[in-house]
Image (spheres, coloured by chain):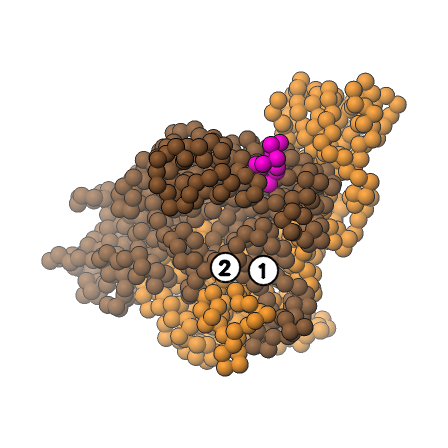
Chain colours: A brown, B orange
Amino acid sequence: MERSKIVNLLGSENQVDSVLVKGWVRTRRNSKTFSFIEMNDGSCLKNIQVIADGKLDNYEEIKKLTTGSAAAVTGKMVPSEGGGQKWEIQAESVEIISLAPEDFPLQKKRHTDEFLRTIAHLRPRTNKYGAAFRIRSELAYAIHKFFREKGFRYIHTPIITGSDCEGAGEMFRVTALDLDNLPKADGKADYAADFFGTEASLTVSGQLSAEMLALALGDVYTFGPTFRAENSNTSRHAAEFWMVEPEMAFCDLVGNMDLGEELIQYLIRFVLDNCEDDIGLFAKFVDKQLMKTLENILNNEFVRLPYGEAIGILEKSGKKFEYAVRFGSDLQSEHERYITEEYCKKPVILYNYPESIKPFYMRVNDDGQTVAAMDVLVPGIGEIIGGSQREERADVLSARMAEMGLDKEEYWWYLDSRRFGSVPHSGFGMGFERVLMLMTGIRNIRDVIPFPRTPGNVEF
Amino acid sequence: MERSKIVNLLGSENQVDSVLVKGWVRTRRNSKTFSFIEMNDGSCLKNIQVIADGKLDNYEEIKKLTTGSAAAVTGKMVPSEGGGQKWEIQAESVEIISLAPEDFPLQKKRHTDEFLRTIAHLRPRTNKYGAAFRIRSELAYAIHKFFREKGFRYIHTPIITGSDCEGAGEMFRVTALDLDNLPKADGKADYAADFFGTEASLTVSGQLSAEMLALALGDVYTFGPTFRAENSNTSRHAAEFWMVEPEMAFCDLVGNMDLGEELIQYLIRFVLDNCEDDIGLFAKFVDKQLMKTLENILNNEFVRLPYGEAIGILEKSGKKFEYAVRFGSDLQSEHERYITEEYCKKPVILYNYPESIKPFYMRVNDDGQTVAAMDVLVPGIGEIIGGSQREERADVLSARMAEMGLDKEEYWWYLDSRRFGSVPHSGFGMGFERVLMLMTGIRNIRDVIPFPRTPGNVEF
């Protein structure tokens, strides 16, 4: 008999005379003449209830089944007389695949997130983390579906890179040199002897490469891992995280904002439609405001606010911020949250930031002071998207690079793209884990990544 | 007016009175009173033909439009009187967005693949590479679609890893240490001072982590970058490539083979259905046997052949191989190709390999000599999938690890998964670029990756 997944059985319209279920025991309790076994196979949040009658051959073993054990059950799926579930299985056989010892850590009680991080290999077997990783999967699918429906091409930009992109934070070095016997030249590490013959790092963004493909294929996006070697232990930063980076030829800043808004609303709608039970868990146990937060984003047009106006609003707010507010300084998280959560009370797209605080590749506006940058802020999370129209004018780009002391030799290919068939184009980066945190109410990035990498943590 | 993509216009059933197209000039030729401009916007292989009449205001400029220039055209799309295309645009305006200089490298002539690798930032603008990267995108989508339809969850396993997985070849080191002033302890590099407090590398496979998630969620798969620091300059190996790794709880070797066969046939069918024009280019210009190769895979059940029988076939072949054939030695590419291309003339799944040549995690068969491993071979490419049923018995696994000198402390979490709720499970790895090479007839892996990484090459 072919095995059925529990998600399919529980969605059945009719009783099934003969089923085979394989999964793990969540709980078991014995009555006088039979045992109730709650089984889960990871296909959905819900368990299926199995009734094992005392007359089964191996009932003495069945009634000792421990939490975490694996079993295969055959039987008949019939309407459940107990409350709480529509169907249950009257077992005809219960084969014990493996018996979990009593020190299985996930006994039926509440565990802290901190403890569960120390057993990241087992935590997906809990309701909460199982749900989080199922949502993670659906969210990833939604991203591909959204872009494909709009005619975007998925591209893989390099993970190992020779360029420093935007000088965005610290980068991890990648090397095949023997560090215990490091070859040296002029007293320094000799990268000429390394695998690539030069210094190499882990990418912090696929943008510059993605631009090359947008200028050939039109609309493209990346979805891959990116890295920051920042030694900061916050709940919002990991050393390894996944990023989505669309890049569009013939698109200006307004088109870029439109895409960001449409994308975020699409993703929320998709997850609500496809992960009802799993989202329900988070709305009930993790963040009571979750549905309100998501509906606020779904049901509102995003406010579009120039940076300059945002500064004015912050100055007039009468709030005491930790970091001072002035035109020309970057907005801190506290400022962004005031704007989106308290002032606008809905998602906000800030745009036209001062040139001085933004990278070289952002398009300079006609005022000569600001660039065509945009950040999307949502209540509860803050910044979720950062992007810009790119500087397509070769002369302006060169001047900006010179100003910022960047080596043009190193970016010869990037500059080439402005010499040959340059066109206005735009794009943004969206942190995948940020979206997942928004969607679940989970407040620590370590809890939305199966095996998170942070300072001191590279286990599993 | 909203811009139309050329792929949509060319697919139109009806003439369109008013269109706006933006793209790049592939060729232009002038007749006495007008210019023909072939424009491409990357949305598909085909160009759209634009007729620019001599009466247009800026005709003097239009008739000097160079290959690679960018333009925006408005006009009427009408049936084409010339051969070769169904529709053409009678231009009402031609706005020149940017004029490419005469040294634009992609003039209308044949370029070698070797030359095009040196301008990897521009080569996606050629027909061949544009087609390859569009197929790459569709193939990636097909993978997600296939697995989701079967109830698999997409998971992200770590890129930076503290474990050596299977000792599979050389690994790249990841470090945040200052190599010019390397901290030392006992004369060796002091990883205690590094970002993770210990040695870290780039992953060669997500399998071990994926197993942890399969034992929680049931059916899962990874699709992400993997790395090998092997200093070999072959046409089949890159330092960075993408791998697909499904992992299934409650699945044995036969189920594993079934999935591999179904997956490959699904992917070919999907790409043939969705990339007709782009595949057509490869079938016409790159590999005249392409359609035959693909149809052979689509229309045949895969032969399933134990390793031992394959050795017998090779011994009886009368062929002179470079590497000797004997039971207990690994099969070389020449042996695999003989089996699949000459002997079976169809795809072959070899299984039950000698234990001595396979990694510790493969399930030992009852004969005590072989393991439940399988490789899928296809004519023209050779091995495209390698996998196994995993050893789920804690005691057998421990013994194998001891035999192979692996440190059990380091794999405590992996061994944990056999203590708690262990079940039979299986999975495999499929090289994404291998499939893309199969699908296009491209014979060098450098030409199916936008910006390939190989020894000495980390540019772009």
- C-alpha distance separating marks 1 and 2: 10 Å
Q: Amino acid at mark 2?
A: Ala
As drawn, the residue found furthest toward the bottom would be B186
Residue at position x 39%, y 48% in the image: A134
Of A454 and B411, nearer the camera is A454
Per the image, label 1 sits on a secondary structure element best described as strand
Tag count in the figure?
A: 2
CB contact under 8 Å: marks 1 and 2? no
Q: Position of residue A57 (x, y in %)?
A: 21, 63
Magenta: main secondary structure equals loop
Per the image, label 2 sits on a secondary structure element best described as loop
Magenta stretch? A362-371
What is the chain identity of the residue bearing mark 1? A
What is the chain identity of the residue bearing mark 2? A
For the C terminus of chain A, the quadrant is bottom left
Q: Amino acid at mark 1?
A: Ser
Is residue B120 visible to the viewer in this orientation of the structure? Answer: no
Is residue A186 visible to the viewer in this orientation of the structure? Answer: yes
Q: What residue did someone put label 2 on? A: A229
Q: Position of residue A119 (x, y in %)?
A: 34, 63
Q: Would you place residue B30 above or below residue B396 in this image?
A: above
In reply to whether residue A366 is colored magenta, the answer given is yes
Residue at position x 86%, y 21% in the image: B33
Of B44 and A405, nearer the camera is A405
Residue at position x 65%, y 51% in the image: A406
Q: What residue did someone put label 1 on? A: A201
Q: Position of residue B370 (x, y in %)?
A: 49, 73
